[in-house]
């Protein structure tokens, strides 16, 4: 299948995931959530435009780690740390994918808004973290760095695909922020819709950047 067809299927599956989750139709949710990520992985695999092999491999590895995280977060509460580790691994892999190439420099001014955002988010979450304070701090640093490097890559390279990766990174940052605030801060009535409604497009945009 082409990337366009797979992307359309992924978006349909994402919609079904969100709908089944909002209506607490758990069997459908358990089926469509991982299916959506599998379809996104196929989007990246189907990419025809030549890209650096390392970039494609790292993005695919990040998507596979995310798939593991999707599964862990659907399991009982005791599996939440495993989900956190899986998504941390995904962000590290995306960081390696987005890191500057030879002759490309990191931008400190581009870092500033992401740094401020990350610090403010952690400060809001800290009172409710308990023993998870250090892991969440590391996770916050990783996803902030991931979004920053995606922004630097777009600023340096320009073009559609770096823009897609940057947009995906920002949506991922939003998704994880809402997830964390809903879990450790205050409950948000529409949290699941916002989390998945930004998470799946984020992954799809990153897959389309291959």
Image: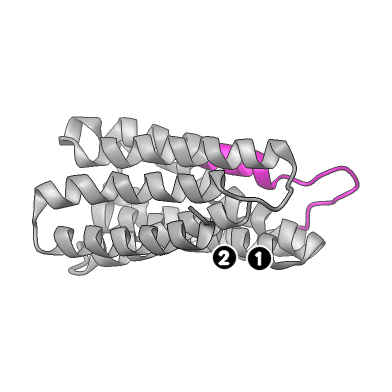
Please name the residue shown 70% across and 36% down the image. 54
**Would you call the spot at circle 1 few (<14 residues within 10 Å), some (14-19), or many (20 or more)?**
many
User: Can you say whether 189 is above or below 38 in the image?
Assistant: below
Residue 41, image x, y percentages: 47, 45
How far is mark 2 from mark 1, CA to CA?
A: 6 Å
Q: Is 187 on the left-hand or right-hand side of 53?
A: left
Residue 205 in sight in this render: yes
Give, as a single range, the part of the protein colored magenta.
Answer: 91-107
Q: Quadrant of residue 22?
A: bottom left
Please name the residue shown 21% across and 41% down the image. 74
**Would you call the spot at circle 2 few (<14 residues within 10 Å), some (14-19), or many (20 or more)?**
many
Residue 83, image x, y percentages: 33, 36
Q: Tell me, yes or no, whether the two marked residues, 2 and 1, touch with CB atoms within 8 Å.
A: yes
User: Can you say whether 184 is above or below 56 in the image?
Assistant: below
Q: Quadrant of residue 87?
A: top left
Residue at far front of view? 1
Q: Which mark is residue 167?
A: 2
Task: Name the residue nearer the viewer: 197 or 39.
Answer: 39
Residue 162, image x, y percentages: 69, 60
Q: Quadrant of residue 142?
A: top right
User: Is 100 colored magenta in this rendering?
Assistant: yes
Identify the residue under disc 1.
163
Residue 42, image x, y percentages: 47, 46
Task: Name the residue nearer the viewer: 162 or 126.
Answer: 162
């Amino acid at each position: 299948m082409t990337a366009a067809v797979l992307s359309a299927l992924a978006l349909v599956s994402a919609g079904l995931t969100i709908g089944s989750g909002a209506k607490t139709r758990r069997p459908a949710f358990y089926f469509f959530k991982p299916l959506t990520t599998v379809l996104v992985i196929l989007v990246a695999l189907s990419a025809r435009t030549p890209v650096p092999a390392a970039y494609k491999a790292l993005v695919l590895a990040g998507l596979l780690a995310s798939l593991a995280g999707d599964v862990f977060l659907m399991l009982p509460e005791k599996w939440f740390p495993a989900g956190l580790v899986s998504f941390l691994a995904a962000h590290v892999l995306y960081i390696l994918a987005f890191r500057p190439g030879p002759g490309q420099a990191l931008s400190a001014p581009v870092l500033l808004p992401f740094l401020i955002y990350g610090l403010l988010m952690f400060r809001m979450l800290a009172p409710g973290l308990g023993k998870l304070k250090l892991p969440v701090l590391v996770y916050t640093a990783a996803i902030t760095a991931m979004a920053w490097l995606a922004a630097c890559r777009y600023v340096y390279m320009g073009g559609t695909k770096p823009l897609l990766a940057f947009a995906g990174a920002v949506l991922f940052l939003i998704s994880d922020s809402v997830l964390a605030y809903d879990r450790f801060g205050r409950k948000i009535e529409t949290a699941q819709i916002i989390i998945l409604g930004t998470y799946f497009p984020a992954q799809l945009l990153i897959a389309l950047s291959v």
